Amino acid sequence: MRSDRFNPSIGAIAPKMLMSRPKHGGNLTWAASVANCPPSEILDFSASINPLGPPRSALAAIEAHIGQIAAYPQPDYRELREALARFHGLPDPDWILPGNGAAELLTWAGRDLAETAATYLLTPAFGDYRRSLRAFDARIVDRPIWQDGDIRPLSDLGADAPKSAGLLINTPHNPTGHLFSRDSLLPLLERFAPVVVDEAFMDFLPPAEQQSLIGEVADFPNLVILRSLTKFYSLPGLRLGYAIAHPERLHRWQGWRDPWSVNALAAAAGIAVLGDRDFEARTRTWLETARPQLYRELKELPGLDPYPGAANFLLVYSQWPVPELQARVLREHRILIRDCLSFPELGDRYFRVAVRTEAENRRLLDALARCCP
């Protein structure tokens, strides 16, 4: 066991860098200000986006539907919902609600969860979970899931929970990349009232290895699945996600939010990519090789210890304070890694990196080898 894993020391780092430090990955404007270069020159390992995209099918759909920006989108997004229902083998599109990224739908999940006695949250947790819960004054009960590099079992989770308590969980887990088995999650559907499962990174796994709970939604009206189309298909600027849940719940969410949450071009691109099996196959073939290779080579670097996650990113323990390492990699190599300061349980000794192309991964490894003391 490492006694310094959870050392909260930030180390010697420029105060202005800490003051403006972003809470999410992908902030190229901030990174460029640190590196003193244009944002376009930053190689971004902080946002876990598929480096093979956007797919040509998405770009072609945007071009073909560009004229639609002169009119409002379909208010019920029927075509997009039907495409998603076919994609997941659901019998009715009423079980799907598209949103302005999964983040918008997480807001409405937070409103639902705030109506419970308490919401149990596995920590470390994606920061936007607390944002959505605090927006509606939800009572949050933290349940640590990560201890000294190991994931605790879910068997005791919620044993002390009130009958009406809710649960917010993600799998693969962010930031560790751990994939919870379907069998470990099923008992939680009986134990908690609303259960919101964020599966934003699930589609990076081959179908035979996925542990999705989408097939349980019809039998558990308390279950909500959140999905993203922006990470796998490299479309974060379009903002497109969706929820799968009982139609009555989604109808209530629809009444809470603004109309036309999804723009016409995002809807068109979403329909197109759902049928792009070639891009899907290329992505999984790339990741099957790239992730274990990056893991092995990170493990060979002195002072670094990656965690073998199942998603398209890796959590890495650093022997040295990450803010200093991050700043040096940025300034000397114009590469952005994701510090984990927004995950308080991890302190300043962890960072997260996306898995990118072989050449880009090599640039990262070379930079880390040069910048680690």
Image (tube, rainbow, N blue to C red):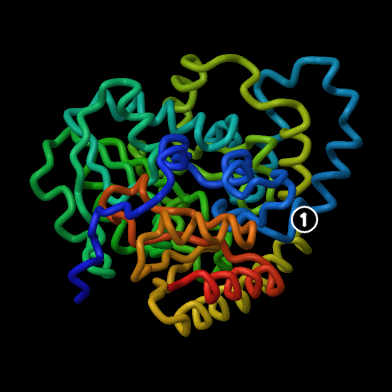
Q: Amino acid at mark 1?
A: Asp
Indicate the quadrant where residue 167 lies: top left
| Image location (x, y in percent) of residue 230 | 63, 45
34, 116: nearer the viewer: 34
| Image location (x, y in percent) of residue 334 | 64, 57
Residue 182 in sight here? no
216, 207: nearer the viewer: 207
Q: Could you say whether the residue bearing mark 1 is in a helix, strand or loop?
A: loop
| Image location (x, y in percent) of residue 234 | 68, 50
Residue 143 in sight here? yes
In this figure, which residue is indicated by the disc labeled 1? Answer: 276
Q: Could you tell me which residue is drawn at 43 percent across and 57 percent down?
A: 324
In the rendered view, tell whether residue 342 sits above or below residue 173.
Answer: above
Quadrant for the C terminus in the image: bottom left
In the rendered view, tell whether residue 188 sits above or below residue 119.
Answer: below
In this rendering, position of residue 21 left or right of residue 69: left
In the rendered view, tell whether residue 156 sits above or below residue 254.
Answer: below
Indicate the quadrant where residue 362 lies: bottom right
Q: Could you tell me which residue is drawn at 37 percent across and 61 percent down?
A: 350
